[in-house]
Image (spheres, coloured by chain):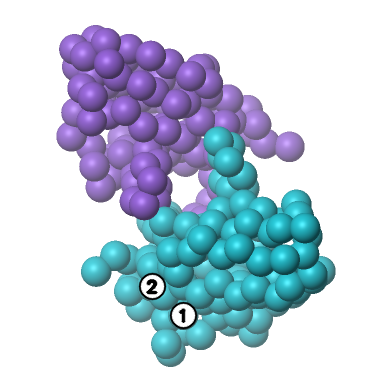
């Protein structure tokens, strides 16, 4: 089975801190994604990557950056955490195109205080 | 207008009931369609893909109407274990759009 592992299940950070969320997948998927999920809003795409060192902005990239130095790892960075970034963050990976083979990590619930 | 809209729910049904969820999407170029299931505080997991001809997986039936840009999910003989949030997902190439989800609670 494809496994997508997110480094932390729960995280509490202070306003202004730089926060790193790590995601690793073990099935050699080209595509990796970062979403946040908020009640009533569904999943919203922050950034995605189709290849190493490649990154593209999603719908809500402001306040975030990403890094993909290796194919299996996609990191989400909150440059200066703010309380409105309190959310559930979900990483996903997939092979090919069209949404097939999409697998999510178990999520990181981030609270910014 | 949201790109993918779902019945807001919540749906509270007794065991054994039949329940239907609806979903509409705005991008007529969408190519792939899915239903995901998400348990409380867990990640979404694929329930089933949705094909134009309609498809069935046990107690679950999914339908797609491209002309009306409408997707449905029917659950027959509901079980307590079906309690979850169901997400409608529409994809155009690698652009995945998620509905906000419909919460289902199946009660004894």
User: Which residue in the structure is indicated by mark 1?
Assistant: B70
User: Circle 1 sits in a helix, a strand or a loop, which is it?
Assistant: strand
Q: Quadrant of residue A104?
A: top right
A48 or A46: which is nearer to us?
A46
For the residues bearing labels 2 and 1, Cβ distance under 8 angstroms: yes
Of mark 2 and mark 1, the one earlier in the sequence is 2
Which residue is at a point 48% across and 64% down the rendered structure image? B9
Quadrant that contains the C terminus of chain A? top left
Furthest residue toward bottom: B67
B103 or B4: which is nearer to us?
B103
Quadrant that contains the N terminus of chain A? top right
- Cα separation, mark 2 vs mark 1, equals 7 Å
Side (left or right) of B105 relative to B15:
left
* Spot occupied by residue A103 in the image (x, y as percentages of width and height): 58, 42
User: Color of chain B here?
Assistant: cyan
Furthest residue toward front: B108
User: Which residue in the structure is indicated by mark 2?
Assistant: B25
* Spot occupied by residue B52 in the image (x, y as percentages of width and height): 58, 81
User: Color of chain A here?
Assistant: purple
User: Circle 2 sits in a helix, a strand or a loop, which is it?
Assistant: strand
Q: Is residue B33 visible?
A: yes
């Amino acid at each position: 089975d494809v496994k997508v592992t997110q480094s932390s299940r729960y995280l509490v950070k202070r306003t202004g801190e730089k926060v790193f969320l790590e995601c690793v997948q073990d099935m050699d998927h080209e595509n990796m994604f970062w979403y946040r999920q908020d009640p009533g809003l569904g999943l919203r795409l922050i950034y995605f990557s189709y290849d190493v060192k490649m990154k593209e902005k999603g719908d809500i990239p402001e306040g975030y950056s990403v890094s993909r130095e290796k194919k299996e790892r996609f990191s989400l960075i909150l440059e200066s955490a703010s309380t409105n970034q309190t959310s559930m963050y979900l990483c996903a990976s997939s092979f090919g195109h069209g949404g097939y083979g999409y697998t999510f990590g178990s999520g990181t619930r981030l609270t910014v205080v | 207008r949201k790109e993918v809209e779902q019945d807001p729910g919540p749906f509270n049904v007794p065991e054994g009931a039949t329940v239907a969820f609806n979903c509409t999407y705005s991008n007529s170029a969408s190519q792939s369609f899915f239903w995901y299931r998400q348990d409380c505080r867990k990640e979404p997991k694929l329930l089933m893909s949705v094909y134009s001809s309609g498809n069935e997986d046990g107690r679950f039936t999914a339908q797609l109407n491209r002309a009306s840009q409408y997707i449905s999910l029917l659950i027959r003989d509901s079980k307590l274990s079906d309690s979850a949030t169901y997400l409608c997902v529409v994809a155009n190439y690698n652009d995945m759009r998620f509905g906000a989800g419909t919460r289902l609670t199946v009660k004894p």
